[in-house]
Image: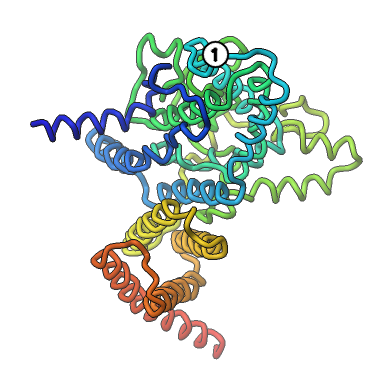
């Protein structure tokens, strides 16, 4: 019985960050080294929650989450983590330096007042960052990847931008000048982010009186809609009061159609990150004169010469003309193959993350490039691209060659013998299957050339 209660307590503690169930007494820290990595702590609960949501959706009569969309969302989150490796904690460092030299008030790190001021300060800063990410075209170029899913499930919360950190960090700097310690900022920055995970779902309806104060699944469904009434609404992180105060609140109304006004229509995770920036680059150079070029960058995504700063809302249909989500018909085995191999890559990514401080830099970079190649090719498979067979054979050969080299050198990977041989078996079997597919593709290409 004690084991069962300890397991239950562990699960409850693991889920607390998702609902901001923390108090000053258990989440105030003196040094940055003491601040937990809440995001890393809850990683297993992300995956568990996705499975639970899928079951609930089916029981409610809703379609199960699509494999291609869910994998595509998770790969975006992985790209964000890969960027973490290269950029490190530059936002926290910048905040700490500004606090060290320019703060106006000395708030005690263990004071409940400090904790609550940081709670409201981070949430208000998030509101204004999030609003500007929609109202400034250059910032939208980083943020739009989060809105590119045409489904609305918990996996959508993990569809994050690899570049957004470069446009968001300075919105929190006024807190450093005020005197909020970096530890309080870092705690609430993480908890604010994790709270927003559970509101990305259709299985939770309206929550009664909580709708007046908190950001809820209902409010956030509106934010992810591309119906006209949904555009540029409900920017809240935790508290919906900011939208009510600043005139951007919109209750949920007619059925919400999710995604971008101009759908991405791709499963390529790299294109999802870069597509709007590529579009913006072309539009910037085609604009006439410096004034119009600056307007392209710093006015809204819907702006055109002669319109208001955020564009003309009547240009957006009340209901999208084609509400069907993007999909490409591929065989069921391809979908399940991508899911299984994605989970293998996800597991490997977590193993590397746990050992990143002991890995040589070049090895770490090489692994990140390999993981990026892998998840990009999964996207190509979902799109039914013929080139994916060649890339997959290369990818599997590469992992087997590297694995053989590590075994020969006696390098200890830290994986158990059973897990290591299971991965090798999966790679060998997959390589054989894709070799057959590649042979068929090459034969068809040769046959086409003869004709």
Q: Residue 172: which quarter of the image? A: top right
User: Residue 76: x, y in percent?
Assistant: 50, 48
Residue furthest to the bottom:
450
Characterize the local packing of mark 1: few (<14), some (14-19) or many (20 or more) Cα atoms within 10 angstroms.
some
194 relative to 166, above or below: above
Q: Quadrant of the N terminus?
A: top left
Q: Tell me the element at label 1.
A: helix
Residue furthest to the left:
1
428 relative to 158, above or below: below
279 relative to 249, above or below: below
User: Residue 175: x, y in percent?
Assistant: 63, 20
One can see residue 234 in this view: no
Give 278 or 324, whichever is nearer the viewer: 278
What colour scheme was applied to this rendering of the protein?
rainbow
One can see residue 11 in this view: yes
Q: Quadrant of the C terminus?
A: bottom right
The residue indicated by pointer 1 is 117
**Residue shown at 42% from the left, 34% from the top:** 38
Q: Residue 365: which quarter of the image? A: bottom right
């Amino acid at each position: 019985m004690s084991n069962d209660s300890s397991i239950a307590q562990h699960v409850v503690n693991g889920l607390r960050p998702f609902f901001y169930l923390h108090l000053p007494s258990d989440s105030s820290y003196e040094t940055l080294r003491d601040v937990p990595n809440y995001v890393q702590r809850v990683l297993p609960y992300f995956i568990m929650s996705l499975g639970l949501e899928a079951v609930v959706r089916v029981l409610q009569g809703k379609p199960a989450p699509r494999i291609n969309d869910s994998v595509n969302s998770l790969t975006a989150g992985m790209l964000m983590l890969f960027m973490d490796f290269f950029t490190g904690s530059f936002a926290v460092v910048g905040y700490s330096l500004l606090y060290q030299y320019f703060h106006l008030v000395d708030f005690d790190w263990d004071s409940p007042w400090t904790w609550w001021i940081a709670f409201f300060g981070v949430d208000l800063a998030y509101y204004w960052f999030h609003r500007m990410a929609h109202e400034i075209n250059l910032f939208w170029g980083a943020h739009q990847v989060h809105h590119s899913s045409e489904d609305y499930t918990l996996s959508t919360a993990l569809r994050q931008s690899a570049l957004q950190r470069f446009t968001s960090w300075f919105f929190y700097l006024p807190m450093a000048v005020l005197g909020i310690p970096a530890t309080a900022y870092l705690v609430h920055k993480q908890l604010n982010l994790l709270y927003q995970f559970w509101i990305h779902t259709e299985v939770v309806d309206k929550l009664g009186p909580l709708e007046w104060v908190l950001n809820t699944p209902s409010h956030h469904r509106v934010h992810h809609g591309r119906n006209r009434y949904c555009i540029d609404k409900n920017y809240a992180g935790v508290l919906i009061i900011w939208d009510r105060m600043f005139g951007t609140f919109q209750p949920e109304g007619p059925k919400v159609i999710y995604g971008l006004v101009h759908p991405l229509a791709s499963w390529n995770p790299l294109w999802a990150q870069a597509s709007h920036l590529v579009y913006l680059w072309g539009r910037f150079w085609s604009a006439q004169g410096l004034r119009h070029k600056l307007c392209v960058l710093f006015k809204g995504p819907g702006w055109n010469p002669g319109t208001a700063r955020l564009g003309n809302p009547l240009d957006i249909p009340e209901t999208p003309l084609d509400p069907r989500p993007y999909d490409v018909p591929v065989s069921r085995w391809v979908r399940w193959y991508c899911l299984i191999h994605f989970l293998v890559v996800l597991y490997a990514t977590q193993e590397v993350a746990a050992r990143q401080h002991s890995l040589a830099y070049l090895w770490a970079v090489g692994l990140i490039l390999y993981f990026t190649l892998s998840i990009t090719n999964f996207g190509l498979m979902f799109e039914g691209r013929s080139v994916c067979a060649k890339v997959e054979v290369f990818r599997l050969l590469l992992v087997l060659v590297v694995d053989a080299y590590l075994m020969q050198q006696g390098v200890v990977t830290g994986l158990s013998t059973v897990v290591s041989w299971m991965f090798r078996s999966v790679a060998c079997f997959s390589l054989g299957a894709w070799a057959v597919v590649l042979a068929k593709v090459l034969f068809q290409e040769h046959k086409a050339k003869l004709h």
